[in-house]
Image: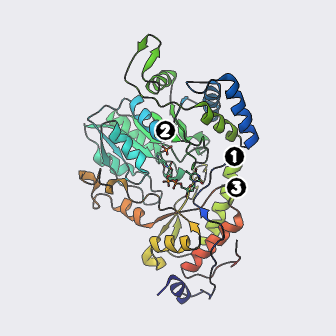
Amino acid sequence: MTLADFANQKQGATDWVPKALEEPIFVTRPRMPQKQAFIEAVDILWKSKWLTNNGAFHRELEARLQLLVGEGEVALTANGTLALLLALKVAGVETGKKVITTPFTFAATTHAVDWVGCEPVFADIDPVTGNIDPVSVANLMDDDVAAVLAVHVFGTPCDDEALQTICKEADIPLVYDAAHSFGTSVGGRSVFAMGTASATSFHATKLFSTAEGGAVFVRDADDKLRCDRFKNFGIANQDTIERSGLNMKMSEFHAAFGLLGLDGVNREIALRQAIATTYMARLAGVDGIRAVTTGIGFEPNWSYFAICVDEARVGISRDALFGALAALNIHCRKYFHPLTSRTPTYAHLPTASAEHLPVAHRFEREVLCLPVYGDLSVKTAAYIGDVIRHLAGYAPISKQMA
Ligand code: T4K
């Protein structure tokens, strides 16, 4: 039986046959600055010949981001993965220890723990948000744990209060991977202000982008200074190499690209909100499909729109849905599949077993990220929603081709 046959078997389904889109639709697209404005910024660099190492654009972007967050300090990096390494280093995480973290994340999170020479200890996740479960974290705490590294998955903030309490009690830092969290806040307070340090990504696929780039948000000027040294080979001044460090610096080209995109962030969030609302309206009442990113209880950025597909209730698996949509030129992503705990580097670890991580394993099977970006039309999102309804055996609402 084909998916179309299946869809048509269900009550309410019609003989509608969705058509493939002419142009591929991807899970996301970068928001580009005005080309002319970028050319003008490049002209400035041509004249100044100052291309990296804390140049004018770099300093301006740091200042603008600090203002946006409203507290603490910020250090730019060349990408989000280096920001994670830097956050762990500045939080004082030492080689040979353990770091409690989530397996439901992009590979970079777990690799950062590995690259600072620590063992990842996998906690299970919350069945609603997909974020690390504080109860699971508390159960894994022991004297060898040097930090907790939590991820605000798809931009939904973690339970910061519960995690802070656990970390304070254990006297260890709480580090956040806030790669999905640009522009999100809880009760008006930026998510970047949470934890001992928060690392984020400005990759091309992110809501705010410098093409490649990232940043670490820290609480005070001392930690900012330590970040600046760690990311510049440990150099304190021309005569002193104070500590071990790497080159993690963002170039002037990337900083300029970012500066030109900052003002458009709120508009982008509003456009994405319209997409998210469209998906939610189309998928409301489809038994077995639920939105993971609901935006409830915080100010969301809609950097991702994730759904869970319960095969037993929908009648088709997430993978079948993914394949059927791809055949129609709608390219979703199975973030985060596989769980990092299932990859060869970590699968042998005691906390990587499926029995220990039942919720994470369910998410790995069920989550699908639908396309969401400002340039996606609401009409196309409505069409995607209708295709999913159809594949789940429900009548589409409009049957209109995007
Ligand atoms: N922590 C978390 C929780 C993360 O999610 C990430 C990165 C990091 C840390 C590390 O930050 P970075 O070191 O990357 O700064 C993408 C991104 O490469 C990655 O940054 C991101 N998370 C992850 C969730 O997604 P892929 O392998 O899915 O990317 P890719 O190239 O398949 O792109 C996805 C879609 O985006 C494409 O189908 C089309 C569109 N796209 C992509 C690029 C690169 C464009 O339209 N233009 C582009 O230039 O990993």
- Determine the image quadrant of residue 169: top left
- Determine the image quadrant of residue 39: top right
Q: Can residue 272 be seen from the camera position used here? A: yes
Q: Which SS class for mark 1? A: helix
Report how far apart the C-alphas of labels 3 and 2 lie in the structure. Answer: 25 Å
Left or right: where does residue 121 sit relative to residue 131? left
Q: Which residue is mark 2?
A: 199
Residue 69 pos. (x, y %): 60, 35
- In the rendered image, the quadrant that contains the C terminus is bottom right
Residue type at mark 1: give it. Answer: Asn
Q: Which SS class for mark 2? A: strand
User: Residue reaching furthest right?
Assistant: 36
Q: Which residue is mark 3?
A: 271
Asked if 151 appears above or below 21 in the picture, the reply is: above
Residue type at mark 2: give it. Answer: Ala
Q: Can residue 166 be seen from the camera position used here? A: no
Q: Which residue is at 56% across, 88% downward?
A: 8
Task: Looking at the image, tell me whether mark 2 or mark 1 is earlier in sequence order.
Answer: 2
Residue type at mark 3: give it. Answer: Leu
Q: Which residue is at 58% across, 55% downward?
A: 295
Q: Which residue is at 65% across, 34% downward?
A: 256
- Would you say the beta carbon of the disc 2 residue lies within 8 angstroms of ligand 1? yes
| Closer to the camera in the image, 154 or 76 | 76
Residue 260 pos. (x, y %): 70, 38
Residue 212 pos. (x, y %): 55, 41
How many residues crowd around disc 2 within 10 Å: few (fewer than 14), some, or many (20 or more)? many
| Closer to the camera in the image, 176 or 239 | 239
Callout 1–callout 3 Cβ contact below 8 Å: no
Report how far apart the C-alphas of labels 2 and 1 lie in the structure. Answer: 21 Å
Task: Looking at the image, tell me whether mark 3 or mark 2 is earlier in sequence order.
Answer: 2
Q: Which residue is at 48% across, 21% downward?
A: 222
Q: Which residue is mark 1?
A: 266
